Amino acid sequence: MHAITIPEPGGPEALVWAEVPDPVPGEGEVLVEVAASAVNRADLLQRQGFYDPPPGSSPYPGLECSGRVAALGTGVSGWAVGDEVCALLAGGGYAEKVAVPVGQLLPVPNGVDLVTAAALPEVTATVWSNVFMIAHLRPGETLLVHGGASGIGTMAIQLAKAVGARVAVTAGSAEKLARCAELGADILIDYREQDFVEELRKATDGAGADVILDIVGAKYLDRNIKALAVNGRLAVIGLQGGVKGELNLGALLAKRAAVTATSLRMRPLEEKAAIVAAVREHVWPLIAAGTIRPVVDRTYPMPEAPEAHRTLESGAHVGKVLLVTPA
């Protein structure tokens, strides 16, 4: 088969479409013939040499894929060769085939085509696990989403609205904020021109956000605490603004607030399986009903992964960027 390899870390040009050995599904795994994968920030970090895949997983980038079941490993039941699926991966999505732990496999939802389904596993698992399983967003509460026009952001807006929450977003342009509004965002904040803490206070009569989903990290830590409501929950899922910040514990205590930080890729298989099962139970019916939908900005043939990485790095996209396996 062919896969996107990284002979040496570097810029987008470091991604090389090359012939590699076929994966073999182990016990409890399914071999998937990949139709499409999606580009995530973690892939950019891996390409640069900053984010190695977990031990024992595929060395190729790609944290999610869609495709068809090509073979079953020993001990697998409930799936058949030819089933159309999408999957959460620790790596290997940028390839013609990938071996997937069966607990990380999902059926393609009704109403979604096979290629577009590649946009779903990572964002749904990330948003559902952090916003709902950990931060317990409830109807009537306010969620602040940093990077509202990103793949994570576009899904977070829709899921929060589906459960009856109010949604505030930050984004870097009027065009991106308009797209967020189309998806249901109630409070639109241009982080280049406005102070999100002040704008959120104005929009919530001083209360702040009950839950904040943050991709920035250290740069926003102090301001996120200021933006939290009493009993608020800050969920950090990205470090685009640095890894070290100063936390005012007094402010946290005064608000009886909580800060959590998670990554999905490094979790044990059983934790990933539990998240995927929750996504199938709670999110898949919303997709099948048309209540929420994947947002795809553009697609590239998989050998053009360098250009797809440049698009993500430029920030010129809204939603997901996909890579389609050559026919």
Image: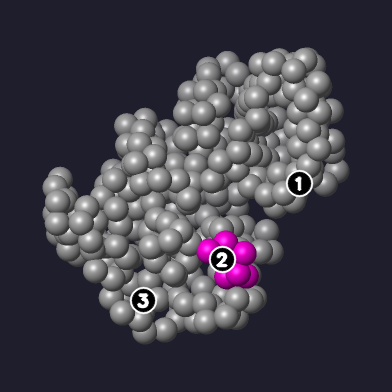
The image quadrant that residue 22 belongs to is: bottom left
Query: Comparing marks 1 and 3, which lies closer to the viewer?
Result: 1
> Disc 1 and disc 3: Cα gap in Å?
42 Å
Residue underneath mark 3: 326
- What residue type is disc 1 on? Lys
User: Is residue 309 left or right of 79 when viewed as pictured?
Assistant: right
Residue underneath mark 1: 244
Residue underneath mark 2: 46
Give the residue drawn at x 49%, y 42%. 126
Please identify the dominant SS of the magenta region: loop
- What residue type is disc 3 on? Pro
- The disc, 3 or 2, on the residue closer to the chain's N-terminal end is 2
Q: The N terminus is located in which quarter?
A: bottom left
Q: Is residue 120 magenta?
A: no
User: Is residue 83 left or right of 159 when viewed as pictured?
Assistant: left
Q: What stretch is highlighted in magenta?
A: 47-52
Is disc 3 placed on a helix, strand or loop?
loop
